[in-house]
Image (cartoon, grey):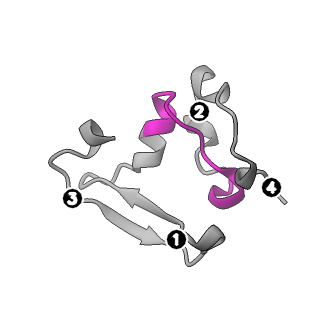
Amino acid sequence: MQRIVAGNRLNCTLTGERPYDREVGVCRLDDGRDIAAILVGRGLGRGCPRYSGGRYATDETDRSRTLPFPDYCRRR
């Protein structure tokens, strides 16, 4: 994460959701790239469909698909 954001200003937009007393949002680099999409695309994370609505499904790789979802990410 440090290498991805180094030297960039982040623009984060909060969705207004506050599950587990935490803010949910989308953060982008100066050039508009979504940092979560970058992490998922590199196989370092997964999108949480419960909160992303599947926004990162097309970014997933074989590696990222092997990562487990935390319980709070499962759709309810």
**Which residues fall within the magenta stretch?**
39-54
Label 2 neighbour load within 10 Å: few <14, some 14-19, many 20+: many
Q: Residue furthest front?
A: 21
From what the image shows, is residue 65 above or below residue 14? above
Identity of the amino acid at label 3? Arg
- Placement of the C terminus among the 4 image quadrants: bottom right
Q: Which callout, 4 or 3, points at the residue further toward the start of the chain? A: 3
Q: Position of residue 34 (x, y in %)?
A: 41, 50
Q: Are marks 4 and 2 in contact (CB under 8 Å)?
A: no
Identity of the amino acid at label 1? Glu
Element at label 3: loop
Circle on res. 23: 1
Question: How far is disc 1 from disc 3 in space, using C-alphas?
Answer: 19 Å
Q: Give the residue at mark 2.
A: 60
Choose mark 1 or mark 2, whichever is in front.
1
Q: Position of residue 62 (x, y in %)?
A: 62, 21
- Does residue 28 show up magenta in the picture? no
Q: Position of residue 48 (x, y in %)?
A: 64, 50
Question: How far is disc 4 from disc 3 in space, using C-alphas?
Answer: 32 Å
Choose mark 1 or mark 3, whichever is in front.
1
Element at label 4: loop
Residue at 45% x, 28% y is: 42
